[in-house]
């Protein structure tokens, strides 16, 4: 699908001294024309390179752990896009979540999971994992204590152990330094260190508003102890071992070090162009190098498993089903001792089953609902791709386009005959999915709810995308809806408000019915669960996502350039970012444009020569 893209950079025409330069221009025109005749379009790019068209303002705030990542990525992205302005600030994870949920900022940063009560208050929050981190307990470098048990750590921070001599150190009072309420670093520390022993951080502890201030305080006070993000550990402080294990990237990746968390960027609803461009950059190879350079862990930094063994049960969305099946097959080929069972059942089944601990990973083709998060507060959804829902009819059906209003009326049972919308005089048979289906819920959200309608009770209910497709392909009078990945020649996807359901139109925000696909674990994933999710997020796994007709989470095809904003395309951490320009297909008028440009070059040179 890829075509060779030639870039011609026009510098400046200063003067023409002899006929040799005119000849050179003629040769250039001939070469360019020849390229056009063999079907390769020429795109003239500005000298600055790609991408140079992002403009506008973006406000990001929240976690001080994520702060240095955001600052450096913002600097790099603004260097590439002089018309772009990004303001970065801290304030803590709680501030980031609240501010983005309230619409006060564009992107919130958090160094812990979004809480169920936050999701209930702001149900449109969309967190994206951009890296992993650990929390290290730190003391002054001269402190004689270099190791603590988890129990000792909890007793120190609760105020039960008050003197360093009780731990083999000097006879000096311990000064406890902590973070403020709402800090993601504090909440992760409390989760892993304090809560298992049912203790709380002492009220007399000195509270600091950032990782940087905790580090500065501990580095200047030989009696103090605190905790910071792993990325903030430097020679000015000493990270103590916990239960004999050092806080290092290697020990986090091997699951030896216990205090681990995911770092997030959060938008309110699906990200707009600028928000998505920033998140894409952080997830790109260049952005993930920033994550690593700052002392954190890349999204896909875990070593490739080569000796995985055990059993894994995955169930849920039939939209995600083919992705899971193929990724499971590929992963089991690499790991003969691994057994992965895959089944469907719908998104609701996947969420409920993983929340209840009946399966290892749940699959969903819609967001986890706030009431589901309240019931199962430990759910950890990970986006693995994007999809759209297409309205489909039999290929012989004369109706090829519907308005959103017509679609809602058909599925509500208000429009009952195809002749009412320009088709044959035949009764419409409505095919729908079962309650709890992610495909149904997304369809209802975008098609039915805006007009306050409900799917007719008489509609024929099918338990999977495959069965909806099979029914519609065998019944000329029927209409249904399926995941975009299930559209094939056996059915016809109708246009909605004049727009086809295609990957290109989804990426350019023209087609309205879009959703994220998820894999969900109960709590932090164990080794096997993480191995499967990592594989789906890898380059090989994302190719499976694309091959199945869905849209890569990273590495999406670049939309055709528009006069507006051209965001950086998504790339996997192992890929080189693609240019933002897209080769123009041979069916477009690139041929004439090439000759026009070549002609202008020749005229410009000739005009300057006559002036000599």
Image (tube, rainbow, N blue to C red):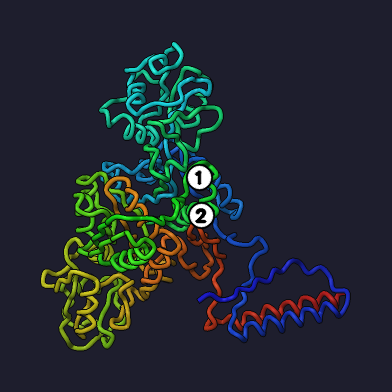
Please tell me which residue is depicted at 16% across the width and 79% down the height of the picture. 429
Residue in the foreground of this view, choosing between 99 and 243: 243
Q: Is residue 178 above or below residue 187?
A: above
Residue at left offset 79%, top offset 76%: 605
- The label on residue 70 is 1
Residue 281, numbered label: 2
Q: Quadrant of the C terminus?
A: bottom right
Secondary-structure class at tag 2: helix
The answer to whether 176 is drawn above or below residue 272 in the figure is: above
Query: How many other residues sit within 10 Å of disc 2, few (<14), some (14-19) or many (≥20)?
Result: many
Residue at 22% x, 46% y: name it: 376
Measured from the top left, where is residue 164 in percent x and y? 42, 16
Q: Is residue 452 toward the left or the right of residue 304 in the image?
A: left
Position of 456 with respect to 250 (left or right) is left
Give residue 324's quadrant in the image. bottom left
Q: Looking at the image, which residue is at 21% across and 82% down? A: 420
Is residue 103 placed above or below 600 in the rendered structure?
A: above
Q: Position of residue 365 (x, y in %)?
A: 29, 61
């Amino acid at each position: 699908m890829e075509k060779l893209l030639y870039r011609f950079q026009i510098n400046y025409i200063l003067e023409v001294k002899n006929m040799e330069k005119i000849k050179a221009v003629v040769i250039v025109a001939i070469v360019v024309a020849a390229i056009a005749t063999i079907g390769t379009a020429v795109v003239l790019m500005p000298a600055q390179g790609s991408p140079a068209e992002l403009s506008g303002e973006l406000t990001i705030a929240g976690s001080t752990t994520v702060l240095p990542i955001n600052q450096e990525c913002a600097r790099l992205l603004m260097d590439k896009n002089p018309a772009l302005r990004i303001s970065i600030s801290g304030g803590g994870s709680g501030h980031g979540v609240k501010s983005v949920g309230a619409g006060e900022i564009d992107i919130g940063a958090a160094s812990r999971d979004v809480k169920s009560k936050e999701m209930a208050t702001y149900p449109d929050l969309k967190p994206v994992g951009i890296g992993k981190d650990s929390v290290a307990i730190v003391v002054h470098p001269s402190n004689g204590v270099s190791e603590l048990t988890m129990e000792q750590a909890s007793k120190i921070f609760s105020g039960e152990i008050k003197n360093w001599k009780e731990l083999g150190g000097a006879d000096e009072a311990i000064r406890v330094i902590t973070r403020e309420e709402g800090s993601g670093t504090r909440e992760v520390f409390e989760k892993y260190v304090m809560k298992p022993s049912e203790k709380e951080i002492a009220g007399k502890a000195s509270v600091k508003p950032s990782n940087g201030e905790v580090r500065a305080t501990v580095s200047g006070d030989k009696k103090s102890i605190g905790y910071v993000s792993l990325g903030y550990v430097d020679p000015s402080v000493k990270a103590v071992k916990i239960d004999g294990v050092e806080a290092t990237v290697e020990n986090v990746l091997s699951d030896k070090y216990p205090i681990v968390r995911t770092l997030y960027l959060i938008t309110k609803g699906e990200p707009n162009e600028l928000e998505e461009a920033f998140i894409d950059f952080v997830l790109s190879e260049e952005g993930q190098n920033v994550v690593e350079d700052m002392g954190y862990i890349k999204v896909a930094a875990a070593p490739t498993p080569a000796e995985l063994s055990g059993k894994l049960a995955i169930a849920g969305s039939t939209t995600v089903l083919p992705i899971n099946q193929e990724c499971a097959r590929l992963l089991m080929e690499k790991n003969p001792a691994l057994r992965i069972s895959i089944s469907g059942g719908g998104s609701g089944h996947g969420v409920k089953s993983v929340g209840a601990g009946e399966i290892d990973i749940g699959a969903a083709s819609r967001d986890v609902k706030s009431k589901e998060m309240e019931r199962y507060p430990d759910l950890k959804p990970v986006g693995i791709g994007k999809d759209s829902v297409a309205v489909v009819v039999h290929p012989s059906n004369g109706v090829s386009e519907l308005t959103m209003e017509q679609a809602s009326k058909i599925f509500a049972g208000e429009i009952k005959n195809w002749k009412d919308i320009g088709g044959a005089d035949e009764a419409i048979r409505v095919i729908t999915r079962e309650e709890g289906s992610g495909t149904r819920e997304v369809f209802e959200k975008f098609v039915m709810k805006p007009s306050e309608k409900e799917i007719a009770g008489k509609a024929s209910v099918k338990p999977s995308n495959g069965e909806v497709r099979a029914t519609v392909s065998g019944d000329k009078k029927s209409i249904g809806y399926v995941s975009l990945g299930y559209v094939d020649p056996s059915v016809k996807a109708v246009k909605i408000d004049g727009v086809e359901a295609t990957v290109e139109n989804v990426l350019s925000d023209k087609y309205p019915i879009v959703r994220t696909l998820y894999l969900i674990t109960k709590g932090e994933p164990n080794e096997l669960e993480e191995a499967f999710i990592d594989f789906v997020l890898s380059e090989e796994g994302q190719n499976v996502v694309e091959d199945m007709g869905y849209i890569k989470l990273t590495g999406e095809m670049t939309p055709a350039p528009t006069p507006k904003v051209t965001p950086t395309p998504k790339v996997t951490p192992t890929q080189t970012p693609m240019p933002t320009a897209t080769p123009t297909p041979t069916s477009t008028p690139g041929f004439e444009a090439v000759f026009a440009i070549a002609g202008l070059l020749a005229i410009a040179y000739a005009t300057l020569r006559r002036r000599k």
